[in-house]
Image (cartoon, rainbow, N blue to C red):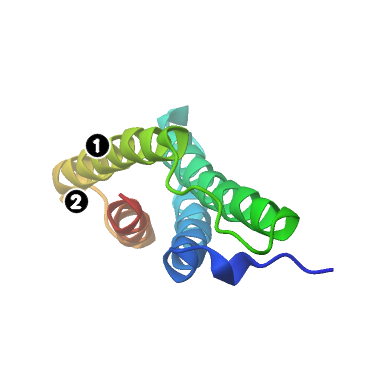
Amino acid sequence: MSLPYKAHPLYHLRRLLIIISLIGITLALISLEPYAPSDGLIMPLLLCTSALIAGADLLFYATRKAARPGEDPPWPTIPWMAADVVLAVLLLGMATAVLNTLTIVYGYRSGSFVVLSAYAALACLLNS
């Protein structure tokens, strides 16, 4: 028996958010420099958290819908809304910090580090 994921009110948006998060995680991990401080791991962790929250929301809604197919589960719930707001603020702050750092180091470094980091920050902006 398959779960009715498509019954979620924001199914397409949540699915797009998961895809963008996975792309952003990949770009952020590729853009890490081997001798740089480990601060660069914060962005992939936030994007991973974003994808996990979106996936968990889809899963919990679908399982509740499958348990009672005749009625719609209550949505949005307060914990999901609070998690979305907190994560949006964190992702927006991360994107701002990364873009600010890239404007400072752009004259000193160029190439794939700057470009990939900028696109990973764009993933943070799109997820916020």
For label 2, the residue is: 106
Residue 87 occupies quadrant: top left
CB contact under 8 Å: marks 2 and 1: no
Residue 89 occupies quadrant: top left
Residue 78 occupies quadrant: top left
- Number of numbered callouts drawn: 2
Q: How crowded is mark 1: few (under 14 residues within 10 Å), some or many (20 or more)?
A: some
Q: Position of residue 38 (x, y in %)?
A: 47, 29
Give the Cα separation between the discs numbered 2 and 1.
20 Å
| Callout 1 amino acid | Gly
Q: Which of marks 2 and 1 is nearer the N terminus?
A: 1
Q: Position of residue 39 (x, y in %)?
A: 41, 30
Which residue lies at the image location 45% right of the left edge and 67% below the top edge? 16
Residue 37 appears left or right of 3? left
Q: Is residue 96 above or below residue 55?
A: above
Q: Position of residue 2 (x, y in %)?
A: 78, 69
Front residue of 104 and 72: 72
Which residue lies at the image location 51% right of the left edge and 41% below the top edge? 49
Of all residues shown, which one is farthest toward the front? 70
Q: What element carries label 2?
A: loop
Which residue lies at the image location 49% right of the left edge and 66% below the top edge? 11
